Amino acid sequence: MPKTLRLLPALLAALALPAHANWYLDNESSRLSFTSTKNADIAEVHRFLVLHGKVDGKGMAEVEVELESVSTGIPLRDERIRDQVFQIGKFPSARINAQLDLRPINALAPGAQLELRLPLRVQLAGQSHSYNAQLLATRLDDRRFQVVTLEPLVVHAQDFGLGPGFNALRSSAHLSAISLSVPVGAVLIFTAR
């Protein structure tokens, strides 16, 4: 058998890798941000600096958010959010899960996009809640794809029992009000391995 014919199965297996491989979140290129509103009309955008995640070969996606990595630009506010709202001593992370159909994403040519509407499950502060998300998946190249929120996902503090933490934060920061509805946006980049 000629050498090139013997290499053909290995080459085809390597080209098919992304279709069956796990996809891992690229934390450096990804972003999860949220908008807070205080005193009725002051909105600010914040983010989490440390994310972990993967999509397995069957399309089960999970993103873990290290809540300690919250970054608002004000260290004292970060500390208050970590301790009073998230209670990171008991609940150090949040999780977002979804089931994806990878076939249409794997079939995309580089640069092509696909709109997705799918349910997400968010686990935060020991509670879980489902949301419907509108997302845009873009195939960046043969080993990477990106998922972004087309619309912010509005997370309600009451869904996770965080109302008392928001009230404590409002009181310690001497604010008249903090919105209990928090828009969340994401740019997530996954790489095949």
Image (cartoon, rainbow, N blue to C red):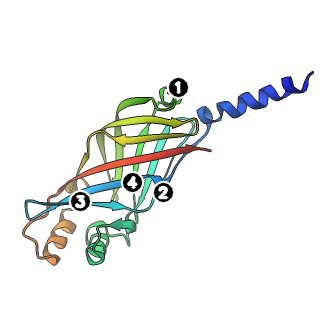
Q: Earlier in the sequence, mark 4 or mark 1?
A: 4
Q: Tell me if residue 11 comes above or below residue 81 in the rendering.
A: above
CB under 8 Å between discs 3 and 2: no
> Residue at label 3?
161
Q: Residue furthest right?
A: 1
CB under 8 Å between discs 4 and 3: no
Mark 3 vs mark 2, foreground winner is 2
| Amino acid type, callout 1 | Ala
Q: Secondary structure at mark 3?
A: loop
Q: For residue 62, which numbered disc appears in the image?
A: none
Give the CA distance from mark 4 to mark 3: 25 Å
Give the CA distance from mark 4 to mark 2: 8 Å
**Residue at point 78% right, 27% down?**
9
Query: x, y percentage for residue 142?
Result: 58, 35
> Residue at label 2?
28
> Residue at label 1?
107
**Which quadrant of the view contains residue 69?**
bottom left
Give the CA distance from mark 3 to mark 1: 41 Å
Give the CA distance from mark 1 to mark 2: 26 Å
**Residue at point 47% right, 30% down?**
101
Q: Residues within 10 Å of mark 4 (few under 14, many from 20)?
A: some
